[in-house]
Amino acid sequence: MIKNHVYIETYGCQMNLADSELIMGILKKQGYEITKQIENANVILLNTCSVRENAEEKIFHRLDHLKNVKKKNPSAVIGVLGCMAERLRKSLIEEKKIVDVVVGPDEYRRLPEYIEFAFGGEKGIGVKLSRTETYEDIEPYREDGISAWIAVMRGCDKFCSFCVVPFTRGRERSRSLNSVVEEIKKLSQRGFKEVTLLGQNVNSYKDGNYDFADLLAACASVDKNMRIRFTTSHPQDLSDKLLYTIAEHENICNYIHLPVQSGSNRILELMNRTYTIEHYLNLIDKARKIIPGVSFSTDIIAGFPTETEEDHKMTLNVMKQVKYDGAYMFKYSPREGTKAYNMKDDVPEEIKLRRLNEIIELQQQISYEINQQLINKEEVILVEGFSKKSEEFLSGRTDTNKVVVIPKKESIKIGDYVRVKINRATSATLFGEAF
Ligand code: 5AD
Ligand code: SF4
């Protein structure tokens, strides 16, 4: 039998990257081969993102381009998976004739079946959401490496008013603590050095009486030489117990991604974020006391409906107060089906863009200042690979998630922990020397 070859492209968040590994795991078990060359594939899958309109536009363009691929290889099956599949469903097949298979995030087990249908000339749609599916029994397909992701929960129950995720990924559900720990053991045996636990809101992880802090502690105890990271935390649910757990375990990284979204209480309320800026800033203070040297990153949205210049200034102020190590910054994008979609998207495009640019500029300045202060300091990095720009340099990250580039050395291997001295810094990268 000639095996079918699958090519998959992944868009969007880390959760999607983890899902693609899961999808490849499912397909491999059914005898499919994974290929990185689209021209060798007879199954072409796009794992998609719906979080902002420009993400979807990019994928629509990609689908238009795939028409040519299908012309050359008419028997190829083209599938759209992930959040866009869930959101657009049948209309994807109706509007984009080249799409044969549409499968949402909770139906990946049935993907082989849908692909089979498609080989038989039928279009397949699987978009049911589940309250229980966690795929915890499925082994993801991972290439050997240093860093791995594990989705410890799926879905989101927060319903922030701008966010489409609760609709595309369904209700919150957690994997068992045991299954996560077992997966980490296997990763450790395979030589992985870092695991990132993923969830839309990891702080509401629950397995019986175990909460997220228990999960983190259990993961950290598997292999002391393995770094444990996690994302994303919602400011409402980040417990003291979690902060103490991070502080107690050397190998749980001192880095928290804590999206603030806006600095204005009025906007936060409209966003249904369920915390105030005072609560948020208290949390940051408390975390800094409990975990000395902890670093923070955040997500910020510019131009949410009704946002005034005053509200925007409050966001800039919070950024100055917290001094985030990094930030993901976005223009508000209305998403059909969300609560905010019913509000008038009344901040004009050029004002949104100007506010976003001010946010980006301020963050660059802050990151630059923080990084300058690290010059002449010592850090320990986990070497992850060659630097993006040159194979003469290696690149790794500090415990606090900062990228450090060092000159290559015979004695340093990928996967090593290395002590480095920082000698130069930009807003995005530190440069140093091993010693
Ligand atoms: N518009 C702009 N940004 C959004 N995000 C989520 N939904 C939207 C939207 N409709 C951002 C939030 C979230 C991050 C993953 O994406 O900041 O934290
Ligand atoms: Fe979306 Fe809010 Fe859930 Fe994050 S916490 S996935 S922003 S609804």
Image: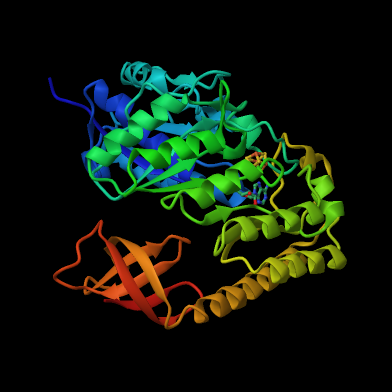
Q: How many marks?
A: 0
Q: Is residue 246 above or below residue 408?
A: above
Q: Position of residue 318 (x, y in %)?
A: 74, 65
State the residue in front, 327 or 242: 242
Q: Is residue 282 above or below residue 423?
A: above
- Quarter holding the N terminus? top left
Image quadrant of ligand 2 equals top right
Name the side, left or right, on which 125 lies relative to 162. Answer: left
Residue furthest toward the front?
248
Q: Is residue 233 above or below residue 172?
A: below
Q: Position of residue 422 (x, y in %)?
A: 39, 79
Who's the residue at 51% across and 56% down the image? 254
Who's the residue at 28% across and 41% down the image? 188
Who's the residue at 50% across and 46% down the image? 230
Q: Position of residue 240 (x, y in %)?
A: 65, 45
Displayed quadrant of residue 8: top left
* Residue 335 appears anywhere in the view: yes
